[in-house]
Image (tube, rainbow, N blue to C red):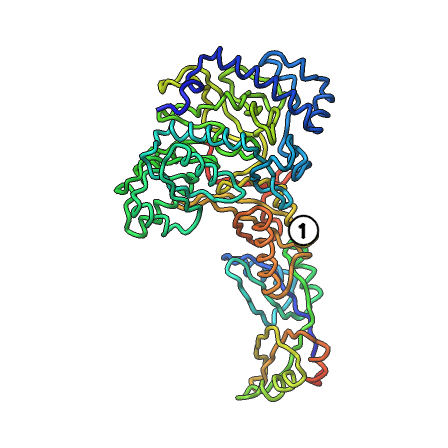
Amino acid sequence: MIWNRERETASRADLGGLQCERLRHQVAYVYQRVPFYRQALDGAGVQPEQIRSLDDVRRLPFTYKRDFREHYPFGLLAIPRQEVVRVHGSSGTTGKPTVVAYSANDMAMWREVCARNMTAAGISADDTVQVSMGYGLFTGGLGRHQAAEQIGATIVPLSSGNTQRQIMLLQDFETTVICCTPSYAIYLAEKAGELGVDLRESRLRVGIHGAEPWSEGMRREIGARLGIDPIDTYGMSELVGPGVSGECTEHCGLHINEDHFLAEVIDPESEEVLPWGSSGELVITTLTKEALPVLRYRTGDITRLDPSPCACGRSLARMERISGRSDDMLIVRGVNVFPSQVETVLLRVKGIQPHYQIIVDRAKGAMDDLEVWVEVSPELFSDDIGGLTGLRREVEYEMRETLGIQVRCKLVEPNSIERCVGKAKRVIDRRDVYS
Amino acid sequence: MLTRQVSVFMENQPGRLLRLLTVLAEANVNLWAHNIVDATDFGIIHLIVDDPGKAERVVRMAGITCSTVDVLQVTVPNEPGGLMQGVLLPLAEAGVNIEYSYAFSGAKQEQAYVVLKVDDVARGWEVLGQS
């Protein structure tokens, strides 16, 4: 099944024509309406009328996550506040989220692109869809919810957490689709096993996953343990949320909704645009957004693009599963974490900057685990145990407040964290998620 | 009497205490008493030694986090109720709170030593009337 046959199977030439027309409009639109982009374009010496072909996109300046931060909360809006119908966001460096906004048309577009992803995953109105991603500012939960609604499926809106109840309800409701992070899928299988439930015997048949990196090995494991077809999806709140791209049942890359998102792959160092098929950083320009259009967003995700037709019949180019990051951002339980955020929190707690290390682990059958090791210097030391356990508690509390996820703080002896030449190794990621 | 206790931060792992005591022994510092308080993955070791200043110096130089604090060290009769009358009662009546405490016995069998970390060390020292 194809949700929007006209768009998803359009010839590359027709698609290119549509993209070009939309790009020209989007650039003129932001130039008129968003001071940030007017300045950026003027600064780059580009006027909207100079954007004539799709290749001209490379003349446009990049947009970075920090631009969202610097214009918090509504500085990048292209429409009056009264026309904003929804805001979402993701965790930010200072505890303030990266804010994104939607017009009524943006919401319609978001529902459309997510509905395409769901349909491509083989989901239809006959399915019962359990949404086990967080509802709220995070786009993952509500994004999937809207998509399931759009295709007419039965929605079970459980949000995240309370795993035992999730397992009970998916059996009772004869749920066929689960939307959750890959690590939660494994966790779910593990918990079910403890409860004596074999999910392979449930009606579950498809998993819609995303919001965090995962490997082919993990896909096989999820498939085997839950008895489902695990489908990869991709998106980020800065662009729309989920819906930028998604796999079809062929499992040969994620179809990008190119009529709404123009994709480029660049060399993150030289910033040169790379030809189709080369591995590099994904850069996305929104083509139809009204509330918060984004020119050449640096996603930080490493992938490659393939425009060749897919066996499923779609002509939309496919991006390969994300193979890494061009920066030091970590994605833990669907939440973006930068080492600099951890540093900021530690500085706030005691007014000093201790040596620290971030350990990310994914123990077998468990959710991602973020541990921050802090060296106890004489300035941090307290001779009574209450002082130190209090310090640990405060660090954990502040991390939770800022990052939005549970973090375990471990106090360690001075010099126990490995130093490399010049720079301490800040992050140890043991998850092996990009393989 | 008032004495200086050396407090040391250690991870709760095999060999850590051994390493600390090796540092002290090599500096010829004599250990009179110690007490370990643990919080699962780390602990604090409290030390009473013959030369706290030297102990602090050599421990620091070994790259180990430590600090010193004044504690009360009192001599009590080594008999039932010995700690109550002379120490606990006066401290309680004066409203001095004991944060932690540990005891050790010395050369003389009839006496025991008690180390008390209190919230108000000056007041504690005053009410116990010891020098």
Q: Residue furthest front?
A: A82
* A356 lies above or below A290: below
Q: Which residue type carries mark 1?
A: Arg
Outermost residue toward the left? A201
Coordinates of residue B87 in the picture (x, y in percent):
62, 84
Disc 1 secondary structure class: helix
Is A285 situated above or below A199? Answer: above
Give percent across and percent down for residue A430.
48, 40
Q: Position of residue B66 (x, y in %)?
A: 65, 60
Image-based side of A347 in relation to A250, left or right? right
Residue drawn where x is 65% and y is 46% of the image: A344
Pointer 1 local density, CA inside 10 Å: few below 14, some 14–19, many at least 20 = few
Q: Is residue A274 above or below residue A93?
A: above
Residue A293 figure quarter: top right
Q: Quadrant of residue A298?
A: top right
Rendered residue at 33%/45% (across/down): A170
Disc 1: which residue: A348
Quick one: quadrant of the C terminus of chain A?
top left
* Location of residue A44 in the rendering, given as x and y in whole percent from the top left corner: 71, 20
User: Which quarter of the figure is the N terminus of chain A placed in?
Assistant: top left
Q: Is residue A100 visible?
A: yes
Q: Quadrant of residue A94?
A: top right
Q: Is residue A284 visible?
A: no
**Residue visible at 67% across and 59% down?**
B58
Q: Total of numbered circles in the picture? A: 1
* Left or right for A18, reference A96: left
Which of these two is toward me, B122 or A419?
B122
Say which chain tag 1 marks.
A
Closer to the camera, A339 or A249?
A249
Q: A346 or A24: which is nearer to us?
A: A24
In the displayed structure, does residue A28 sit left or right of residue A317?
right
